[in-house]
Image (cartoon, coloured by chain):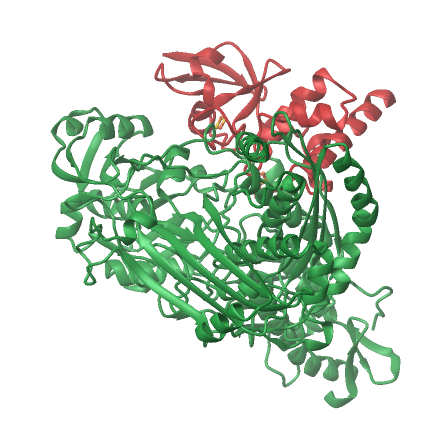
Chain colours: A red, B green
Amino acid sequence: MKVHVKVNGISYEREVEPRALLAYFLREDCGLTGTHVGCDTSSCGCCVVVMDGERAVKSCSMFAVQADGHEILTVEGLADGGRLHALQQGFWDQHGLQCGYCTPGMLLTSYALLRHNATPSEADIREGLAGNLCRCTGYQNIVKAVQQAAGALRESVGAS
Amino acid sequence: MSIQAKPLHSVGVPMKRKEDPRFIQGKGHYVDDLSFPGMLYLSLVRSTYPHAEIRSIDITEALKVPGVKAVITGKDLEAAGLGWLPTFHGFDKQMVLAIGKVLFQYQEVAAVFAETRAAAVDGAEAVQVDYAPLPVVADPFTSKADKVLLRPDRESKTNRIFHWEVGDKDGAARALASSARRIKQRVWFQRCHPAPLEPCGCVAYFDTMGRLQFHVTSQAPHVYRTALALVTGIAEDKIHVISPDLGGGFGNKVPVYPGYVCAIVGALKIGRPVKWIETRTENLTSTGFARDYHMDVEIGATADGRVTALRVATTADHGAFDAAADPSRYPAGIFGIVTGSYDFPVAYAEVDAFFTNKAPGGIAYRCSFRVTEASYAIERGMDILADELGIDAAELRRKNFIRKDQFPYPSALGFTYDSGDYHKTLDVALERIGYDALLKEQAEKRARGELMGIGLSTFTEVVGAGPSKHFDILGIRMFDSAEIRIHPTGAGIVRTGTKSQGQGHETTWAQIVAEELGLDAGAIMVEEGDTDTAPYGLGTYASRSTPVAGAAITMAARRIREKARKIAAHLLEAGEADVEWTDYRFQVKGVPARSVTMKEVAFAAYTNMAQNEPGLEATYYYDPPNMTYPNGAYVAVVDVDRETGEVKVRRFVAVDDCGTVINPMIVEGQIHGGLTEGFAMAFIQEIQYDAEGNNLSTNFTDYLVPTSLETPHWETAGTVTPSPHHPMGAKGVGESPNVGSPAAFVNAVVDALSPLGVRHIDMPMTRDKVWRAIRDAESTKG
Ligand code: FES
Ligand code: FES
């Protein structure tokens, strides 16, 4: 089947098997390997991408054909040219990652979270990230990273 | 000549990680990100039975599946002399693909190679295997009876893999018998799995020179290369192992797995690259599990609480093959650390390990070879003793700690503890948590019937294997290595035999080089995991990177400094003996105005070296004279809901002493992560099997990993007692929190339930289990 998906602003038209998962479509058909796969039960969140600008979806639990005609944001599309996104900066500054395997999913889930709630409390963040596992960090610095990013994004909105 | 304005302190600085920019932008290189022209995918057929005879394997339908290129079985491998794979510590071997029998559920039975991931899975599903079930041995106590012999292929016709013992058996028995007070408790450290978020996997191909290019999730790439050479007969120079970015390891990525061997055989047989990436289910059901130690702990004491003797007898479940990744001469790892932080005059420990129809393993999950089990046993034991004697748990520990002036301390089980100040570390923890106020609060709550618990764990770890005279893997001695090259502009590269899986070596190693040489850590590149370029090393596990490779880096840097001194003397027109290294630069003794920086020396090493040997590089193989002994004092405070059994971890304070800290930000991150895994083991994490040997924990909905919601907030602090024998005084930290924290949680929950008469609860302390413990205690109390 033919699918047409806009990923990080670029159009990809590809022939896929109907059963092809979005995660593998992104990784293998679009060559965007930043989106990871860590489980087979929709439990880990390594594969989270953002659909149509604000919905965090687990790309391992969607068929590529379900993304037909939609826009997808992956970790590769977060930075603005050479400038890191506030969330990327936050994760770096706050030591919000160790092995980095969960990080793309964490970033994209947080991205959607901040779209819906610009001033999340620690509890909001912990709840918002409950679908994303991290085996390395213990989450504490991830929470700090998201808080830093929320602050930075508020400031940049205030400034503009 | 310029004078450096500011000293370049690097060690002790919370430098942001150099590896992060690629990870936060999705530019990491994990093994599944690799792709090569013509690459095939491998999928494994796995046993549905825990123990069965294989009557037949029919691959005809599988070969008809579109895209399937080949199928291989155990018989094919056996014919090629590759039927069995030696396990790392050399006592056993493991079937690559089942030959004649399967010995655990999910065992590898056949390998299917296909053009796409999906076609490989389709092909695997089309393989028909006819099994005739055999009686199942699902626990080590049944195994002990030898009614069903699980491994007739072995010379010794028993299910017992080994009996190991250490210490003074008779002395401990006598001391226990004559002790005024004694306790005995069986504690079980349940079967767990490290479950890094990236599963295991590899890509194998033979290049145009006929050389095996093997990209693999390995914590020990050089050991893989040598093991592959020994197993396959391929000359070691024709094997190139590359361990790319690893999405966590925690011990899971130390052993060599059957999937790897199948991928290599497929690449050889078909002549195309082969990728094998296990699924989460395959990861949890077939690759290295950890723990599964049933430990009978006995402690004797005087009436006023001085410990007199320790005896621990362990029954270990090793699964179908003995794939425990312990050093050759230590079948039970470093379990002898079981005397912990306490001054036991006499002790004895024994471990009996058995085969069962479960997945093989017994690997060191965020642990220095069975140290987690040992620490848990002694820290639970001390709490039970405190309860028995009616002495405060902190007081009992203080009374029995090895004192600061006793170091180096020879333990009853043969270790020489390097350094520590256990009293101080505990004091810091109690002060931080507000112990006295908590005890008061607890007394008030108890009077009201509320369940609040305070749990301590004051553990001592032992990490950093070698020394090589004691430790080896497959005969390869446990040292580690570093190679440093300083370029003309003062930038440089360091390579080691270790392999980061998230620990941040790219930053920490650069900081060590920068500190030793007065260079910019930002301009020191770190490369690991490539056996063509890195010096030979034993890899990263057992918290050995900083104690061993960190020391090798320090020593290599110091070698460079000695060479640089000669060039500096030439530049300063002084005698070498008159040049000193001070404030991160060379200066003529007593004349600070006459100095040169390392950067200047580096340039001169290539442009103006006079009669000195050109270049500025060094390699060092470091064989540690002793292990290091990090320690810590942890306090957990919990509230237990009497009606539901729900446990809330209200606070957790972790005070770690890991010697000199190189990057405090990274150390704190390691502690957060380790505590979270300790929390997981204490409360939710278990690989469960039913009585028929079926694995019940096959994915993340049954094998639970804590999320951000239930993970407690961690409070960390530290004391610093440098290791006297490590060149920087560092001890290693990655595993301490995972080793030390389970006992703190269990001690806290048992303390909460102790007014009801509960004395012990095995992990994981699920809500259900705690609720049952409360209900049973209340009903026996009437
Ligand atoms: S890969 Fe685990 S949730 Fe998608
Ligand atoms: S950083 Fe390793 S899983 Fe999150």
Residue B264 x, y percent position in the rendering: 28, 48
Nearer the observer, B211 or B636: B636
Q: In the picture, which quadrant includes the N terminus of chain B?
A: bottom right
Judge left or right: residue B556 versus residue B450: left
Judge left or right: residue B244 versus residue B677: left
Numbered disc total: 0
Residue B393 x, y percent position in the rendering: 70, 54
Nearer the observer, A82 or B198: B198
Task: Say if A70 sits above or below B421 in the image.
Answer: above
Q: Residue at x 79, y 49 (%)?
A: B435
Q: In the picture, which quadrant includes the C terminus of chain B?
A: top right
Task: Say if B388 sits above or below A74 in the image.
Answer: below
Q: Residue furthest front?
A: B782
Task: Say if B667 sits above or below B630 in the image.
Answer: above
Q: Residue at x 36, y 38 (%)?
A: B285
Residue B487 is at least partly visible in this image: yes
Name the image quarter holding residue B477. Answer: bottom left
Residue B151 x, y percent position in the rendering: 21, 53
Nearer the observer, A6 or B755: B755
Judge left or right: residue A69 versus residue B21: left
Residue B185 x, y percent position in the rendering: 51, 53
Name the image quarter holding residue B26. Answer: top right
Residue B319 is at least partly visible in this image: no
Q: Residue at x 18, y 45 (%)?
A: B74
